[in-house]
Image (cartoon, helix red, strand yellow):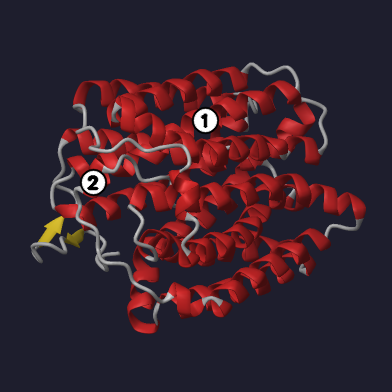
């Protein structure tokens, strides 16, 4: 990762470049990426409102995340297969079209079952889009792969920060409006990409459905995926369960998660690379996972104000973890980046699907503190995996040429 906010350095020509001087196609894709990532945290501030409006329990409403990420996990095996056959541009447009349709349908739901089903369709569209966006940005960007990746990371952070804010602003009037708003924004993205993005080069070799699974045969990549699985359980316990614990108005909840998202963006793009350079990726990751576990325990047992502070602080730790996990997943094995990333994400998104469902259930079986204790234990297990498998994770794969980003198909939603 580059260490500067507005410049990147192409590892192949060693000349500083600006990420701001990009073709319209790159800005169109990056802008649509912001909206796509907004969809993840969009429902956070309105989860209690949805539960009230549809007469549903917290565990039922949390299925909005479960269906979304379960489909996303399975789609990791499909996106490379699809894009290597129809091309990046068509894959992006197909994903955007699905998001527009299912986001709009989500706003018309009359039951929580309908909403969960529409969110599953939304997850498929988002997987197709986000999994292809980085490859398209790298292929079309000026200034080399480093500037392109920084731009992508910035879009991710901005989207994660703005999603709860949009959900709060529109959801204060009705829980349905954020879904309609997302559909409208993604429709604009569809038009922009149609107008500005040309078709990307087709890969020389088509990706099979089993390539990502075969890539997990590498010990280092399997270790990263296993650690990320436990980490994601902790991550999405915070994202999906905390809004019920805070029990705030959409505006207040949106403000909390906006601050959370800002810290996520800053620590992902600016802080994590500097700490990696100074201490090394594995030390940063292990320490951050342990700190996240401590934060979760304090969040679960602290006062309401303490819970708010811990929720916001967790954004910094999550931002660092996201960056380090991404780089490890893409560099620890000799598999092509798109294939390695697909295998890694296939594993870790299952935890993102499980946590939103299990956390409310655990509360029903015990008390409100225990879901956070379980999440803290999961984060510690992730750190233990990193420590035990540190020799396998220390291997640095040879840097791939930027052309692989387009020739090999797609890079999958790495963060």
Task: Report the Cα–Cα distance between label 1 and label 2.
Answer: 23 Å
- Residue 149 lies, in percent from the top left, at 28, 53
Res. 369 image quadrant: bottom right
Q: Is residue 185 left or right of residue 277?
A: right
Q: State whether residue 357 is above or below residue 128.
A: below
Q: Secondary structure at mark 2?
A: helix
Which mark identifies residue 124?
Answer: 1
* Dot 1 or dot 2, earlier in sequence: 1
Q: Is residue 357 left or right of residue 41?
A: right
Locate the N terminus and report the quarter of the image it occupies.
Answer: bottom left
Nearest the camera: 119 or 21? 119
Q: State whether residue 278 is above or below residue 248.
A: below
Q: Given the current orientation, which residue lies at the most extreme bottom position?
A: 279
Kindly check if marks 1 and 2 are in contact, taking CB atoms under 8 A apart as contact. no
Provide the residue designation for mark 2: 138
- Residue 272 lies, in percent from the top left, at 40, 69
Q: State whether residue 279 is above or below residue 251.
A: below
Q: What residue sits 41% from the left and 53% below the top?
A: 340
Q: Is residue 372 left or right of residue 278?
A: right
């Amino acid at each position: 990762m580059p260490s500067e906010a507005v410049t990147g350095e192409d590892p192949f020509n060693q000349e500083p470049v600006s990420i701001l001087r990009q073709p319209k196609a790159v800005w169109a894709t990056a802008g649509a990426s912001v909206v796509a990532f907004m969809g993840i945290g969009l429902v956070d501030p309105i989860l209690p409102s949805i539960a009230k409006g549809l007469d549903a329990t917290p565990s039922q409403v949390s299925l909005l995340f479960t269906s979304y990420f379960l489909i996303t996990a399975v789609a990791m095996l499909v996106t490379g297969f699809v894009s290597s056959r129809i091309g990046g541009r068509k894959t992006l447009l197909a994903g955007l079209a699905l998001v527009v349709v299912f986001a709009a349908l989500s706003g018309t739901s009359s039951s929580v079952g309908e909403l969960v089903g529409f969110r599953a369709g939304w997850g498929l569209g988002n997987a197709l889009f986000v999994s292809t966006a980085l490859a398209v940005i790298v292929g079309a960007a000026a200034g080399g792969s480093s500037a392109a990746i920084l731009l992508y990371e910035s879009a991710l952070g901005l989207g994660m920060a703005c999603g709860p804010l949009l959900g709060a602003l529109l959801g204060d009037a009705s829980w349905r409006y954020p879904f309609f708003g997302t559909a409208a924004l993604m429709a604009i993205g569809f038009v922009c990409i149609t107008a500005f993005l040309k078709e990307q080069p087709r890969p020389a070799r088509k990706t099979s459905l089993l390539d990502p699974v075969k890539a997990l045969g590498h010990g280092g990549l399997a270790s990263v995926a296993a650690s990320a699985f436990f980490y994601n359980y902790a991550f999405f316990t915070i994202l999906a369960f905390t809004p019920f614990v805070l029990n705030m108005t959409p505006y207040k909840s949106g403000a909390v998660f906006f601050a959370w998202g800002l810290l996520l963006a800053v620590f992902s793009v600016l802080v994590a690379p500097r700490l990696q350079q100074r201490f090394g990726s594995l030390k940063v990751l292990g320490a951050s996972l342990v700190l996240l576990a401590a934060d979760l325990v304090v969040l679960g047992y602290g006062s309401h104000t303490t819970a708010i502070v811990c929720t916001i602080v967790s954004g910094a730790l999550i931002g660092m973890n996201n960056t380090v996990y991404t780089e490890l997943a893409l560099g620890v094995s000799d598999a092509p980046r798109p294939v390695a990333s697909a295998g890694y994400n296939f594993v870790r998104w299952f935890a993102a699907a499980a946590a939103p469902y299990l956390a409310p259930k655990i509360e029903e079986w015990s008390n409100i503190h225990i879901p956070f204790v379980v999440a803290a234990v999961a984060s510690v297990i992730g750190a233990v995996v990193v420590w035990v498998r540190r020799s396998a994770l220390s291997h640095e794969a040879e840097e791939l040429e930027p052309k692989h980003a387009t020739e090999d198909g797609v890079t999958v939603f790495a963060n």
